Every structure is written in structure tokens, then in C-alpha cells.
Image (cartoon, rainbow, N blue to C red):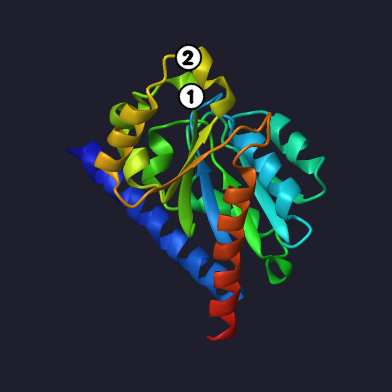
Amino acid sequence: MKQILIEKNILQNNDDIASKNRQILKDKGVFTINLLGAPGGGKTSVLEQIIKNIKHNVDVTVIEGDLYTTKDAQRIEKHHVDVIQVNTGGACHLDASMIDQAFEHIDINNLDFLVIENVGNLVCPASYDLSEDMKITVMSVTEGNDKPLKYPAMFQRSNALILNKIDLIDSTDFDIEEFYKDVYSLNENIKIFKVSCREERGIDELCKYLESQINDKRRNKEFQ
């Protein structure tokens, strides 16, 4: 019983901080995504492709979550965008208080697009609101098409799903029809993008979608 009450208190505190941060992002017209996925799914590779394609039209900042290292942040920094590294010290997810601290290092007044790359995990991150406009999950065909039903909360709470490494599908037993069936059974409104970072397939469609969301947030700010 105590564990349940403690967890509720933790999530309530998280939601209170997230609500405060969300208002700041709304007032500044900053479109924010929480990029989720298991280790090895290709979150950072997808993010590199997104940045490469939109950074000339959009001011981007990345909050990079990791357990201990700065390896992914170093990769992103090479694309000449601002990166704030958040190390959780072993925690399996980012929370709103960590994002709140990262805000101290972000020029929010000159920002269009904030990407929060979460810790690699298909379980815990789904429960924590980070003030994002949308959760986007990245998974690869090499993980197997059973992941949506095994980790339903992640897919139920995501607005979009990026199926990565599609160029390798013929080398796996990934059942694409079953995958779509399972995903839509959990979330009929989710938008699915099939991409290959290595071949740069599907990246244009994904980036156009994100840019439309960024522009909508900008317009909403103008009409406030």
C-alpha cells in the first residue's frame, strides 16, 4: 500500500512540474517531442536525420537523456545544434524535474523545436509527462513485431511511431501486417512512419510532418 501511495505522489509531483513547463513552452510557441524507444532501436540515428533535414528552417535544441555517458550528445552536437546532456545516474527514465533543470541552459526565446531524447527503455518513460506536445516512439524491425503487445503502454500513449531499419526487414522474420494490426489495436490514431536512416528512406515524410506541427505551434503563439 505504501508503494502505491508513494508512486502516486511521485507522479503527481512530476505532473505539477510538467504543467508549469508546458505553459512556458506554449507561451513561447515551442513544439516539443519526447523521443522514446528501446536501446538499439535507432533513436539517435533518427534524430540525426531529422536535424540534418530541418535545422536550416527551424531552431532546434536537444535534451539528451542517458544513464551515464555523453556519447549520444556528442553525436548530436556534431550537427551544430544546442545540446543539453542529462545523466540520470542509473534511473531508467527522464522526469519533469530533470527537464526543469535543463531549461536553465536553454535559450527558450529563440527556439522553435525542442527534442527530448529519453533513456532507452520501453516501460518507465511512458508514464512520465515531460511537457511534450507528443510522444514519438522509435522501434526497429530487428526488435521483432511482438513489441507493441508486450509493451502496450508505450504504444498506447504515443502519437507517432517510427519503424526504423526498414531496409533490413527482408533479413528478419518481422511480420509487417501483424505489426500494423497490433499497433492499431492499441492505438487507432497513431501515425506510423517507415524509415531507413542508412538509406534515408521515409525521412522526408517524417520531417514534413514535424515541420507542419512546428509551424502550427508557431501560428498558435501568434494568435494568443
Q: Is residue 196 left or right of residue 169?
A: right
Q: Which residue is mark 1?
A: 141
Looking at the image, is 184 positioned above or below residue 159? above
Q: Which residue is mark 2?
A: 172
Quadrant in the picture for residue 100: bottom right
Q: Dot 2 surroundings within 10 Å: few (below 14), some, or many (20 or more)?
A: few
Q: Dot 1 surroundings within 10 Å: few (below 14), some, or many (20 or more)?
A: many
**Sooner in the amino-acid sequence: mark 1 or mark 2:** 1
Q: Is residue 190 left or right of residue 131?
A: left
Outermost residue on the bottom side: it is 223
Q: Is residue 170 left or right of residue 105?
A: left
Marks 1 and 2, how far apart in space?
Answer: 7 Å
| Amino acid found under the numbered disc labelled 1 | Val
- Residue 10: image location, x then y, percent: 36, 48
- Residue 205: image location, x then y, percent: 58, 50
In percent of the image, x 30 and y 42: which residue is there? 184
Q: Are the residues flagged by discs 1 and 2 in contact, CB closer than 8 Å?
A: yes
Q: Which is nearer the eye, 169 or 189? A: 169
What is the total number of numbered labels drawn onto the structure image? Answer: 2
Which quarter of the rendering shows the N terminus?
top left
In percent of the image, x 42 and y 52: which residue is there? 129
Secondary structure type for disc 1: helix
Secondary structure type for disc 2: loop
Quadrant in the picture for residue 24: bottom right
| Amino acid found under the numbered disc labelled 2 | Thr
In percent of the image, x 62 and y 61: which residue is there? 211
The circle on residue 11 is none
